[in-house]
Image (cartoon, rainbow, N blue to C red):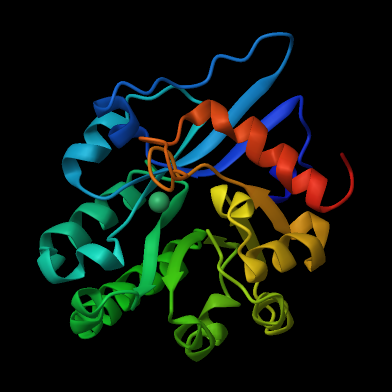
Amino acid sequence: MLEKFSKKDKKNLFDAHFHYAVCKENGIDLPDFQDGITWSGISCAHSKAEFEIQSKAPQNVIQSYGMHPQNAANENIKESSDFLENLLEGKKISFIGEAGFDYFTSEFREAENQQEEIWNIQLDLALKYNIPLVVHCRKANHKLFEYSKKLSQLPEVLFHSFMGPPVEAQSLLNHGINAYFSFGKQVFNGNKKVIACVKELPFERILSETDAPFQFLKGEEYTDLNDITIILDEILRCREIL
Ligand SMILES: [Zn+2]
C-alpha cells in the first residue's frame, strides 16, 4: 500500500499522516486541488468519537485507529482494544496506529508500563490481522529494536515523524522491517537528524506528512492539510530534485 504512494509525485499528493477528526473540529477542510492533481492521506483516530467522525470521510482518506502512547495513562485499555478488534474484524481500517512509545516528557515517561501494554496489544493485533502499523516514537528508538523481530513480520510499518538519525532508520530496514519514514514540518526547522534522514535514506522509503492540525511552525496556529505541497517541495529540495 505505501509503496505506491512513495513516488513523491506532485500530481498525486500523499499525506502519510494527519488527523481528520481534529482537523474537522477546527474547521480545517480536506484539500481541494485542481488541475488534475489528486490527493490522498492516512488519518489516525484515537478515540471512538474521533473514529465516528473519521469514518464518514471520503474514500481518499485512508482509515487508521489506535491507542496513542501519549494517552496511555488515561486509556480505557479493555474498551479501546475491543473497539480496535471490532474495526479489524469489520475491515473498517487499513492501519493500526498511532501506536508506539513517547518518553519525551517525564509525565509521558511515567506511563511507560501502560505504553508498553497498549503497544503489545496493538502489535499483536497487527500481526493477527496482517495489517500495517503507524508508529509514533519519541526518545525511545531503542524500544523499536526490542520489537524488531515482530515488526519485520508485518506487511508494512510507517514510522511517522521519524526523528532520526538515519543510521537507526537504516538499521530498522536492515532488521528486515518493511519500513517507511514520513517527515513533516520538521524539515523546515533545521533539525539535523531529520534533514540527514531526508537526504540519505533510500528515496522510496521516504514519505511526506502534515500531521495536521498539529506540528505547526512558530507563528502558525495550526498546520493546514494544503501544506503538504510545501513539505513535499522541501523534501524534494533536500534531495536536490527541485
Ligand atoms: Zn499525529
Q: Position of residue 125 (x, y in %)?
A: 37, 67
Picture quadrant of residue 77: bottom left
Picture quadrant of residue 120: bottom left
Indicate left or right for 229 with 120 as reference: right
- Residue 103 versus residue 81 in the image, above or below: below
Q: How many marks?
A: 0
From this viewpoint, which residue is outermost toward the front? 219
Residue drawn at (68%, 84%), measured in percent from left and top?
175
The answer to whether residue 235 is seen in the rendering is: yes
Taking depth in this image into account, of 190 and 179 the one nearest to the observer is: 190
From this viewpoint, which residue is outermost toward the top? 35
Indicate left or right for 203 with 166 as reference: right
Taking depth in this image into account, of 9 and 77 the one nearest to the observer is: 9
The answer to whether residue 60 is seen in the rendering is: no
- Residue 40 versus residue 96 in the image, above or below: above
Rendered-image quadrant of the C terminus: top right
- Residue 113 versus residue 194 in the image, above or below: below
Residue drawn at (78%, 66%), measured in percent from left and top?
201
Residue drawn at (56%, 54%), measured in percent from left and top?
186
Q: Position of residue 221 (x, y in %)?
A: 35, 35
Residue drawn at (33%, 78%), measured in percent from left and top?
103
Indicate left or right for 203 with 55 as reference: right
Q: Position of residue 157 (x, y in %)?
A: 57, 64
Q: Position of residue 174 (x, y in %)?
A: 73, 82
